[in-house]
Amino acid sequence: MRLSAISWALVVSAFAGGASPSLLRAQAPVPEGHESRTALTAELESYNAFANSSAYSQRTRAAARLTAEQLRSRLERGDFKPGDRFSVRVSGAVSFVDTITVLAGPSAQIGTFGELSLHGVLRSEIEGAVRGRVAETVRDANVTVRVLMRIAVFGAVASPGYRAVPLETRLDELLMSAGGPSPDADPMQIRVVRGGAVLMDGDRVMTAIAAGETVGSLGLVEGDLVSVEPREAPWNRAATLQLVTVFATPVVTFFLLR
């Protein structure tokens, strides 16, 4: 997530005619964390320009320098860390389907095709990297790779926990992967939360489900939480009578003993 002060500056510059084509491309609606190397490099150049411009305050320039350093580090080190997962499907002369867990290095063992170093590899580059490794063994193979994101699903669902799903997963599919809402779930009280802040809830969530929106189209990132709240328990007659009795008994006793 980029710093809001810089984002506003980019928008202002674009409307003022001061944005370069590469800067505009950097603002394309690509799911966060899955940008191409070209887009990230263009974005790095843009933040460097802001950091070195005297047209902005020291605070804005410092924020731009920090973001530029983060982008530079990401381009050099890549996106993968031990414990990350991605699915691989190979078809053609050889068939291979597996979910791969990233190892220390970072690296990954792609079945019998061998070990693949992931140092410097972005999420947007993983399919090409795996395809290159497979091509060393099998010619003309069809390779499909899907990076899996860990999204938490908790609350009134059958199997709460963390789910590793690809970007193409619809929001309703994500809920069903956790066993679906429990009988006491309130469909109008589903929230998407990030770091304690509610990103969407209520009607917005139901609209997203109806529209078939996905984890990627909604901009969810690793660690986001989908929380399903239970319905509020209705007052039944027995509970109401019991509550009235609790409060009324001392009053009645007081008047009887006077």
Image: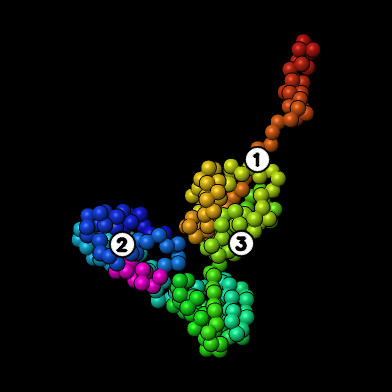
Q: Is residue 132 visible?
A: yes
Label 3 environment density (alpha carbons within 10 Å; few <14, some 14–19, many ≥20): some
Q: Which residues are magenta?
A: 36-45
Kindly state the secondary structure of the residue where label 2 is placed.
helix
Looking at the image, is 54 positioned above or below residue 38? above
Q: Main secondary structure of the magenta part?
A: helix
Specify which label sits upstream in the sequence, 1 or 3: 3
Q: Amino acid at mark 3?
A: Arg
Distance Cα–Cα, label 3 vs label 2: 34 Å
Image quadrant occupied by the N terminus: bottom left
Q: Which residue does the image show at 77% across and 21% down from the upper left?
A: 249
x%, y% of residue 21? 27, 65
**In the image, which disc is placed on residue 163?**
3
Q: Amino acid at mark 2?
A: Leu
Q: Which residue is mark 1?
A: 231
Specify which label sits upstream in the sequence, 3 or 2: 2
Specify which label sits upstream in the sequence, 2 or 1: 2
* Of labels 3 and 2, the one closer to you: 2
x%, y% of residue 157? 67, 51
Q: Which residue does the image show at 50% across and 76% down from the upper left?
A: 127
Q: Amino acid at mark 1?
A: Arg
Image quadrant occupied by the C terminus: top right
Q: Which residue is mark 2?
A: 24
Residue 36 or 103: which is nearer the viewer?
A: 36
